[in-house]
Image (tube, helix red, strand yellow):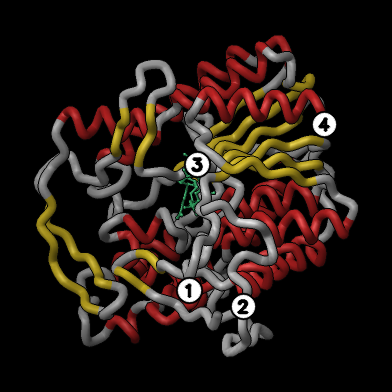
Amino acid sequence: MIIKPRIRGIICTTAHPAGCAAHVGQQIDHVKSAGPIDAGVGNALILGCSGGYGLASRIVAAYGCGAKTLGVSFERPPADKRTATAGWYNNIAFEEASNTAGLTAQTLDGDAFSDQMKADVIRTLKADTGKIDLLVYSLASPVRADPKTGVVHRSAIKPLKPLSIKTINVDRGEVSQVDLEPASAEEVAATVAVMGGEDWQMWIDELKKADLLAPGFRTIAYTYLGSELTWPIYWGGTLGKAKEDLDRAAREIGDQLSDLAGSARVVSLKAVVSQASSAIPVVPLYISLLFSVMKKAGLHEDIISHIYRLFATQLAQGAQLRLDDADRIRMDDVELSDAIQSEVKRRWPLVNTENIAELGDLAGYHEDFLKIFGFGLKGVDYEAEQDPTLGRAIAD
Ligand code: NAD
């Protein structure tokens, strides 16, 4: 079949196998040319390995640090006349490239929040990989079934107070004012249950009980803090409450790892285009302005260069950690610098549908969005027939 992007609101319902492989390949090439990192990571477990920051973390762990990687993700295989999700193709591309390069890579696809997946990972580590030096927690999900109670929690991306704020319809390039209702107490609690730190703690509990954490083991989980422009919807909203809970979990996990001389840290990353971030109102408009300002200043970082910098400057042996007063590693230093934020804030009240192309980088946003699904990659023939199953037997 010939595969074209089919965009429905904030998602693209198709993915291009050759394009996804090219996207993974570009990120691998970036890391190879940036050079090795001595981070003491022999074995790494990446939760949320198939896209965005998790995929980049897996690529840097493998190709920068030489680590064996076990990845977990929740992706949909192809079905009759329907492509797989991009992450399904990314995982295969990563494994194939890694096998060729002699880097051990295994992937388990299923619900990382479940007891079953934790048991499967433990079994796989015991059989093949051994103790892990690093666990990267990079899940982004709208829903989590609590494995103990069976209750299905659904996150709500909402402010805590009534909010009238600028946003953009990325598809149509229309900037408008949106009125958002505040979350109820139940919605806040559900968002914390999905995106907070409880599941991260459950992973560490289980892996420690199974004696699969190596001496000096480290674990990191990703957060976003942002600036005054995004606070009303992010840090000051339901997502911020969930991310505060991640900070709590980091402190508790850190205590739990003291006998291994291990550490648990939340890492605050910069805003990028991902499946997760495109679902948050306001954020695509902010990203579009941010990209324009950072590119003009020659300071733009894409996902892979940002995560390479994290590993090279903050996870490498002997690194001087850039911590804030909550002990988080701060990688958003450039995004949040006065020079960048003052210009983004100057543009914010001015931006409208007519001048978004001039004040923002909507083209760059679109380009990154399509790349997530394997479209717009150089060297890929988008008129060529694709086998969406990649020759694999697919269950009905
Ligand atoms: P993403 O949507 O690109 O990737 C999410 C990953 O989670 C995918 O691999 C997906 O398969 C996996 N996943 C989702 N539900 C799962 C489940 N139940 N079981 C197993 N795997 C599951 O997301 P992203 O933007 O890379 O976000 C990753 C983390 O980085 C999040 O914690 C997010 O808050 C944080 N972060 C993102 C940004 C940003 O701008 N995108 C900025 C800072 C921090």
Residue 189 rendering spot, x and y as whole percentages: 26, 27
* Label 2 within 8 A of ligand 1 by Cβ: no
Instruction: Tell me the number on the disc at residue 128.
Output: 4
Residue at the image point whose x is 57% and y is 24% from the top:
203
Q: Are marks 2 and 1 in contact (CB under 8 Å)?
A: no
Please report whichever mark, 3 or 2, sits nearer to the chain's N-terminal start.
3
Residue 186 rendering spot, x and y as whole percentages: 19, 28
Return the residue at label 1: 370
Query: Looking at the image, can residue 366 be seen?
Result: yes
Residue 211 rendering spot, x and y as whole percentages: 73, 14
**Viewer-closest of 307 and 369:** 369
At mark 3, the secondary structure is: loop
Which residue is at the far front? 396
**Disc 1 marks which amino acid?**
Leu
Instruction: Tell me the number on the disc at residue 139.
Output: 3
Please report whichever mark, 3 or 4, sits nearer to the chain's N-terminal start.
4
Separation (CA) of disc 3 from disc 2? 29 Å
* Residue density around tag 1, few if under 14, some if 14–19, many if 20 or more, within 10 Å: many
Q: Nearer the viewer, mark 1 or mark 4?
A: 4
- Which corner quadrant of the image does residue 209 belong to? top right
**Disc 3 marks which amino acid?**
Leu
* Label 3 within 8 A of ligand 1 by Cβ: yes
**Disc 2 marks which amino acid?**
Gln
**Viewer-closest of 140 and 365:** 140
* Label 4 within 8 A of ligand 1 by Cβ: no
